[in-house]
Image (cartoon, rainbow, N blue to C red):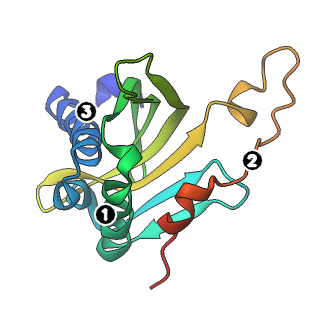
Amino acid sequence: MESHALPVADQLAIHDVIARYAWALDTGDVEAFVNCFCRNGTLIWDAFEEPQRWEGDEALRHFATFFRSLPSSAGRQHHVSNTVITRCEAGVNSRSYVAVALRQGDGPHLLNVMGYYEDVFREEDGRWRLAQRVIRDWSGPILKDFAGQTGERVARPKPLPLQGASYQP
């Protein structure tokens, strides 16, 4: 089913969660960030050599707290657009472009991430929440149909400042 088959109120609620996730992460609001996810919600960052995974409130809280503790996170903005929503057996799938800008003094500012989200949303406690978000770089399989692209996953080394983001219960 296409997104038009999903009631407009549900589409707006899903867009609202996508926006709240960005605002929470970019303003250091850890609890608002965790609240965007279902209980046992999962965040997967599949851009590095080894995909990183955070599952459940405690792990998601660790993720948001880690980024809030990085001095380089102050001034960061997630820009999310071109969201496509479709129904699926688990609830609703969506895909969105994401670019992350970092404020650097008076500028010019840095475009730090260019990628996309693959999300699964479920209704829980009467509202839509992220059951799973996968963060991917704008490279590899998504670009396979372009000349000169192999479609192979392009994994990059995890930057040293992000080493502490990993979560071990």
Crowding at mark 3 (Cα within 10 Å: few <14, some 14-19, many 20+): some
Label 3 is placed on what type of residue?
His
Q: Which residue does the image show at 48% across and 39% down from the upper left?
A: 117
- Looking at the image, residue 5 sits to the left or right of residue 51; the answer is left
Whether residue 97 is situated above or below residue 34 in the rendered picture: above
Name the amino acid type tagged 2. Ala
Instruction: Confirm whether residue 92 shows in the render.
Output: no
Image coordinates for residue 114, horizontal then vertical, percent:
55, 29
- Upstream in sequence: badge 3 or badge 1: 3
For disc 1, the marked residue is: 65
Answer with the quarter of the image where residue 75 lies: top left
Labelled disc at residue 155:
2
Task: Identify residue type, mark 1.
Answer: Thr
Which residue is disc 3 drawn over? 15
Depth check, mark 2 against mark 1: the one in front is 1
In space, the residues marked 3 and 2 are separated at their CA atoms by 29 Å
- As rendered, which of 8 and 76 lies closer to the eye? 76
Residue at (19% x, 30% y) in the render: 12
Q: Looking at the figure, which quarter contains the C terminus? A: bottom left
Residue 166 position in % (x across, y down): 52, 69
Task: Note whether residue 161 is visible.
Answer: yes
What's the residue at 13%, 62% (across, down)?
125
